[in-house]
């Protein structure tokens, strides 16, 4: 449904930023995704540190079991966060691609309507 890049009129980057004809979010969302995964990795390291701290503080078997529970629960939470973050970012990418496709459909139907009506008659 999208027009090939070769058929699109060539405009400057500055003009694209001013007019919102071309959305930049598709490129930016990848950076946001990786930054979010970095934050999720920091959370994972926090859970690992907590589990190690609990294990070092408690010398009994109960402390080690508690540390293992914290570690397993933390990793499950991190996994859920990573999946939710991926889904959230994919939703935004899908919405912006849908917008691009609707824009291409509008241009195609406008061109088809203009071709059907033909040029205006001159008397």
Image: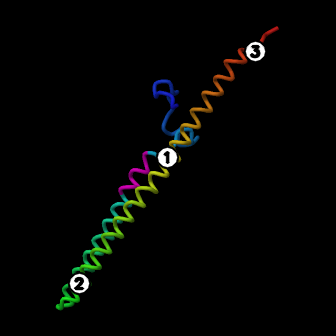
Instruction: Please tell me which of labels 1 and 3 falls first in the chain.
Output: 1
**Label 1, label 3: how far apart the Cα atoms are:** 40 Å
Q: Residue furthest right?
A: 123
Q: Which residue is mark 1?
A: 94
Quarter of the image where one finds residue 57: bottom left
How many C-alpha atoms fall within 10 Å of the one at disc 1: few (<14), some, or many (≥20)?
few
From the top left corner, tell me how far across and down residue 95 is, in percent. Answer: 53, 47
- The secondary structure type at the circle numbered 2 is helix
Q: Which residue is mark 2?
A: 65
Image quarter (top left, top right, bottom left or bottom right) of the C terminus = top right
From the top left corner, tell me how far across and down residue 43 is, in percent. Answer: 33, 70
From the top left corner, tell me how far across and down residue 111 is, in percent. Answer: 63, 24
How many C-alpha atoms fall within 10 Å of the one at disc 3: few (<14), some, or many (≥20)?
few
Left or right of 87 on screen, residue 113: right
Picture disc at residue 120: 3
Residue 90 falls within the magenta-colored stretch: no
Left or right of 97 on screen, residue 118: right
**Label 2, label 3: how far apart the Cα atoms are:** 83 Å
Read off the magenta span.
27-34
Instruction: Please tell me which of labels 2 and 3 falls first in the chain.
Output: 2
Q: Nearer the viewer, mark 2 or mark 3?
A: 2
- The secondary structure type at the circle numbered 1 is helix
Q: Nearer the viewer, residue 75 or 22?
A: 75
Quarter of the image where one finds residue 68: bottom left
State yes or no: discs 2 and 3 in contact (Cβ < 8 Å): no
Q: Nearer the viewer, residue 102 or 62?
A: 62
Q: Residue at x 22, y 89 (%)?
A: 62
Q: Is residue 92 above or below residue 11?
A: below
Q: Is residue 67 above or below residue 59?
A: above
Q: Nearer the viewer, mark 1 or mark 3?
A: 1
Quarter of the image where one finds residue 122: top right
State yes or no: discs 1 and 2 in contact (Cβ < 8 Å): no
């Amino acid at each position: 449904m999208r027009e090939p890049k070769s058929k699109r009129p060539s405009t400057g980057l500055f003009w694209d930023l001013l007019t919102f004809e071309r959305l930049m979010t598709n490129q930016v969302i990848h950076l946001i995704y990786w930054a979010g995964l970095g934050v999720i990795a920091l959370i994972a390291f926090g859970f690992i540190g907590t589990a190690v701290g609990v294990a070092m503080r408690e010398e009994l078997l109960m402390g080690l079991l508690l540390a293992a529970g914290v570690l397993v629960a933390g990793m499950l939470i991190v996994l859920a966060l990573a999946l939710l973050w991926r889904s959230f970012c994919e939703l935004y990418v899908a919405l912006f691609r849908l917008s691009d496709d609707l824009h291409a459909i509008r241009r195609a139907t406008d061109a088809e309507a203009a071709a059907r009506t033909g040029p205006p008659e001159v008397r």
